[in-house]
Image (cartoon, helix red, strand yellow):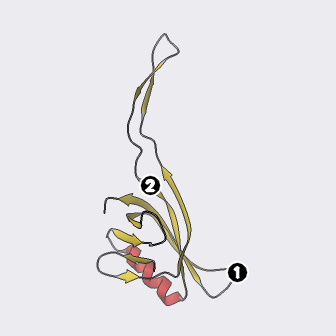
């Protein structure tokens, strides 16, 4: 069962229906004057950021999860179907709750996030 928690409040979405992530490369590449060569300082990529979309079966559950994300707190996502088991993140952008246009019965919560250490 998927769960999300900010340490004080927890929510249980029906599904994670969308996840798009980006990891920014942090290598430093410098052109060497007078040559076609470059100097490279290799660095590990940053943590993931992106948008995650949760599905809730009622408006009340969606609003509760929206409020959970609006608090000034780190969020822990536990997803047993993922090889990683989940992630910790903070909100980094918008929190959008909407009624699903197709079903008109479930609610979708989209959250812009940035992954952080657990």
Farthest-out residue, top: 34
| Sequence-first disc among 1 and 2 | 2
Q: Residue at x 38, y 37 (%)?
A: 43
| Relative depth, front residue between 65 and 93 | 65
User: Compared to 71, does 39 lie above or below?
Assistant: above
Residue wearing tag 1: 102
Q: Position of residue 77 (x, y in %)?
A: 40, 71
Query: Label 2, on which residue?
Result: 48
Give the Cα separation between the discs numbered 1 and 2: 30 Å
Q: Quadrant of the N terminus?
A: bottom left
x, y (%) of residue 90? 37, 64
Label 2 crowd (10 A; few <14 / some 14-19 / many >=20)? some
SS state under label 1? loop
Q: Mark 1 or 2, which is nearer the eye?
A: 2
Give above or below for 27 relative to 3.
Answer: above
Closer-to-camera residue (16/91): 16
């Amino acid at each position: 069962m998927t769960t999300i928690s900010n340490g004080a409040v927890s929510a249980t979405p029906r599904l994670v229906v969308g996840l798009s992530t980006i990891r920014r490369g942090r290598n430093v590449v410098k052109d060497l004057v007078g040559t076609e060569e470059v100097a490279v300082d290799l660095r590990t990529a940053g943590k993931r950021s992106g948008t995650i979309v949760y599905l809730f079966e009622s408006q009340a559950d969606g609003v509760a999860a929206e409020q959970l994300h609006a608090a000034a707190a780190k969020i822990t996502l536990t997803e047993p179907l993922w090889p990683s088991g989940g992630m910790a993140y903070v909100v980094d952008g918008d929190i959008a709750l909407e009624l699903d246009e197709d079903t008109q019965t479930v609610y979708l919560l989209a959250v812009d996030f940035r992954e952080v250490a657990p």
